[in-house]
Amino acid sequence: MTLPDINRLFPTVERCRELLQRLRWPEGVTCPRCKDRRISTLKDYGRFECSICEYQFTVTSGTIFHDSHLPLTIWFLAVLLLVEARKGMSANQLRRTLWGQHKGSYKTAWYLFHRIRKAMSTAERGMLYGTVEMDETYVGGKQKGMGHGWRKNNQRKKEVVIGIRQRSGELRFFHAEDAKSGTLAKYIQENIATDVDVIYTDDLPAYPKAVADRTHDTVTHSAGEYVRGDVHTNTVESAFSLLKRGIVGSWHKVSAKHLPAYLAEMEFRFNRRKREDLFLDTLRHMITADPMTFENLIHEPDPDFDKVSA
Ligand SMILES: [Zn+2]
């Protein structure tokens, strides 16, 4: 999907609604309240009425789009821009692209992107198997007024990101409390199949206990060894470098509070980077996500937003 495609296929709110209707109700319009399919379409375009419970609704009722004053055409453009930005895009860039240099609101742009990210975070995550690489990295940590005096080991100021990647398969990113063996074990149990062929990690002492019964091999980074035949963690590290370029180049400042949302965005896009239906799949997640997902999502940047930078 390209910008010219969007302009051609979805030039009006009505055309956007038609697509969302197909994605939300592939089996036909269904009452969100009583789930019946005996529905009449009202003259007022876009409204339906349930013949059983008389509930009136639109395709966006009870979804992420419901309480938004933004036209669906703007939502569609924001989705395309976000899914096609390999290294992410800042809310300020979105604002300039949609509304112009000195127009539009940063808060509105930020709100749009965060809602899309929240929908991405609802994507299903199956277990990883075959050959799996696992690694940890640290992001953030430079606080205002702290200069460059921080140290790598000062975890209080650095956020831990765990990366797990199946070779020729999917990627998982997690914002973790720490990189201790109990924490690593939890992510391994939740994401790596018990009959995985092998897990490759570096020689962090926490791994042998964390992997437990799963087959495990390490490269000894501490001794300068990075590749030993098939044993390496290069593919998960390449995903980390994409993440860090995103934080440094596009998002500029990511607070610890919002880090999971950015990780979900990176993971979602990375796992679908070769798929033709990336744009449609994102919209499908947005129109079908449980509205509870969005209930606690604040509508504007929080005061902590610029406290941690990459
Ligand atoms: Zn009904």
Image: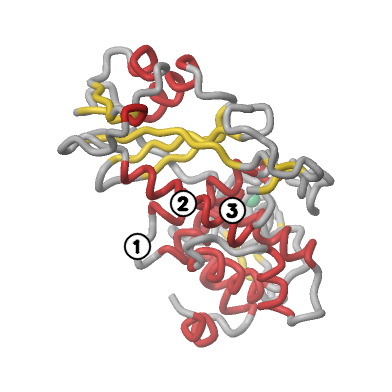
Q: Nearer the viewer, residue 225 or 2?
A: 225
Q: Secondary structure at mark 2?
A: helix
Name the residue at 80% across, 43% down: 304
Discs 3/1, front = 3
Give how far across and how far down residue 29 sits, in percent.
Answer: 54, 60
Residue 72 visible in the current orientation: yes
Mark 2 Cα-neighbour bin, 10 Å: few <14, some 14–19, many ≥20: many
Question: Residue 286: x percent and y percent?
Answer: 57, 56
In the rendered structure, which disc, 3 or 1, sits on the residue that comes first in sequence? 3
Q: Residue at x 45, y 50 (%)?
A: 241
Q: Which residue is mark 3?
A: 247
- The residue tagged 1 is 275
- Quarter residue 82 falls in: bottom right
Residue 192, compared with residue 82, is above or below; it is above
Task: Answer yes or no: disc 1 within 8 Å of ligand 1.
Answer: no
Nearest-to-viewer mark from 3 and 2? 3
Amino acid at the residue labelled 1: Arg
Where's residue 157, x and y in %? Answer: 68, 33
Residue lying at the far left in this picture: please name it: 229
Instruction: Say whether marks 2 and 1 touch (CB < 8 Å).
Output: no
Find residue 268 and name its label. 2
SS state under label 3: helix
* Residue 72: x %, y % from top left: 65, 72
The answer for how far apart the CA atoms under marks 3 and 1 are is 24 Å
Q: Judge from the rendering whether residue 19 lies leftward or rightward of residue 166; answer left or right.
A: right
Q: Residue at x 62, y 50 (%)?
A: 32
